Image: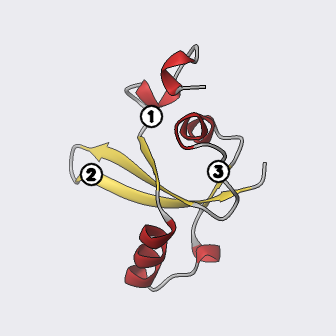
Amino acid sequence: MAAENISFNVLKHDLVPEHHLLTEDEAVAMLNRKGMTRDQLPKIRKSDPGIKILETIHGPIDEGRVVKIVRKSETAQEFVAYRLVTRG
């Protein structure tokens, strides 16, 4: 099912930040750059509406994948956060 065919795409809402699924190489590079492990990342559940929409675009998203979340900010222009996909 394509994201355009669902009844409501939460990622198109003005108040929902951009969600981007990182490739494995991008995730490893980001973790190395920040000196972190996957377990140190904040979590996001597979049942989160943003992840469900990403699954319509990328196919099933396994636990352990990393999602980049970009929030717009009046003071910082953008605030980037990373989340680890977990069960649920």
Picture quarter with the N terminus: top right
Q: Residue at x 63, y 36 (%)?
A: 52
Q: Secondary structure at mark 3?
A: loop
Specify whether 24 is left or right of 15.
Answer: right
* Residue type for callout 3: Ile
Q: What is the x, y in percent for residue 17?
A: 41, 40
**Distance from Cα at disc 2 to Cα at disc 1:** 13 Å
Q: Residue at x 56, y 38 (%)?
A: 50
Query: Taking 69 as reference, is 12 above or below it?
Result: above
All told, the count of numbered labels is 3
Q: Which mark is residue 34?
A: none
The residue beneath circle 1 is: 16
Q: What is the x, y in percent for residue 56?
A: 58, 34
Extreme-top residue of the structure: 7
Q: What is the x, y in percent for residue 23?
A: 48, 62
Q: Are there few (<14), some (14-19), or many (20+) residues within 10 Å of tag 3? A: some
Frontmost of labels 3 and 1 is: 3
Tag 1 or tag 2, which sits nearer the N-term? Answer: 1
**Distance from Cα at disc 2 to Cα at disc 3:** 25 Å
Tag 1 or tag 3, which sits nearer the N-term? Answer: 1
* Residue type for callout 1: Val
**Distance from Cα at disc 3 to Cα at disc 1:** 20 Å
Q: Which mark is residue 78?
A: 2
Query: Taking 78 as reference, is 18 above or below it?
Result: above
The residue beneath circle 3 is: 61
Q: What is the x, y in percent for residue 42?
A: 59, 63
Q: Residue at x 58, y 18 (%)?
A: 6
Q: Secondary structure at mark 2?
A: strand
Pick whichever, 31 or 58, lies toward us. Answer: 58
